[in-house]
Image (cartoon, rainbow, N blue to C red):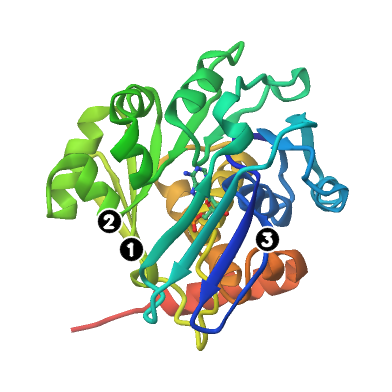
Amino acid sequence: MKLLVVGSVAFDAIETPFGKTDKILGGAATYISLAASLMNVKSGIVSIVGGDFPQEYFDLLTSRNVNLDGVEIVKEGKTFFWSGKYHNDLNSRDTLVTEVNVLEQFNPVIPESMQDAEVLLLGNLHPGVQLSVLENMPQRPKLVILDTMNFWMDTAMDVLKLTIAKTDVISINDEEARQLSGEYSLVKAAKKIHEMGPEYVIIKKGEHGALLFHDGKVFAIPAMPLEEVFDPTGAGDTFAGGFASYLAKKQKFDFDTMKSALIAGSALASFTVEKFGTERLQEISEAELAGRIQEFKELTTFEVEI
Ligand code: AMP
């Protein structure tokens, strides 16, 4: 079981009502691969960084069994930098800075060591790059999952639609689903998005959980009610990473397995938000993860008799 991940590897500077950070480790692919490592799934990243990316971050990822053969280093270039500020409710944020830097000239190359990956997760990045990776796989992976954001809908909708048409699962938030489909109702939005290609549509609703649509069916999960949410950055990526890793592990890609995968993704994401950046993901143990999955079970299982 191998998971190939395409996405940003970045520096982030984050401001929440609880504090702010200088440039710390971030990027969609980073969160995804850290989530995969917690699921004991071997992942490999296709991305690009500058000469300013510290060795200690490479070491951290390698120590988590993340294959970095596909991460190009442009010595004289600068790593992608994103900065965001959250509003008091933590449900919305403003992007303060997006410095694309080395990502501007990125021609992804899939390393030989990852060409046989069964699951491909197209994490947040220019849809043209996502498409190029998918088209350059020697054989189509068994499952292709796409994560994207409103930024690409605003700036690259045409190529995004071409990419969406070739994927099996799309994972987006409610606002993005509305923007992509032009429908306010999430049920109608999911229908329209199915028509664009993906057989499975996941719509994330932040602290209200997520919905999975497939073939006229819908499955809903809540988010873990947490006493404190500190920094939501990377929650969506961690969720996608946990979801994809669960499926890679089980090698089954049906609706029922996806329901469980959704729980794995949500449990992992619930850790990410407890501290700044990737800090919490770096420290949790397998036992803690198992405990939270059990809490999820208790949260969502009930019997009723009338
Ligand atoms: P999330 O909070 O799940 O939306 O993901 C946050 C991560 O996405 C941060 O670590 C950023 O580095 C990364 N990110 C933000 N904007 C972009 C972008 N335009 N392209 C690629 N990655 C981005």
**Mark 2: few/some/many CA within 10 Å (<14, 14-19, 20+):** many
Which residue is the site of mark 3?
23
Q: CA distance from mark 1 to mark 2?
A: 6 Å
Residue 57 shows up from this direction: yes
In the picture, measured across the screen, residue 162 lies left or right of residue 305, that is right
Is 115 situated left or right of 272 in this image?
A: right
- Mark sitting earlier along the chain (1/2): 2
Q: How many marks?
A: 3
Cα separation between marks 3 and 1 = 28 Å
Question: Which kind of residue does numbered mark 2 sit on?
Answer: Asp
Q: Nearer the viewer, residue 75 or 46?
A: 75
Q: Is residue 137 left or right of residue 212?
A: right
Residue 30 in the image: state x and y as whole percent: 66, 49
Whether the residues at callouts 1 and 2 have beta carbons within 8 Å, the answer is yes
* Residue that badge 2 annotates: 174
Provide the residue designation for mark 1: 205
Which of discs 3 and 1 lies nearer the camera? The answer is 3
* Residue that lies at the very extreme toward the front in this rendered image: 76
Q: Residue 255's x, y, as percent?
A: 39, 44
Which residue does the image show at 50% across and 30% down from the upper left?
A: 143
- Horizontal side, residue 22 vs residue 59: left or right: left
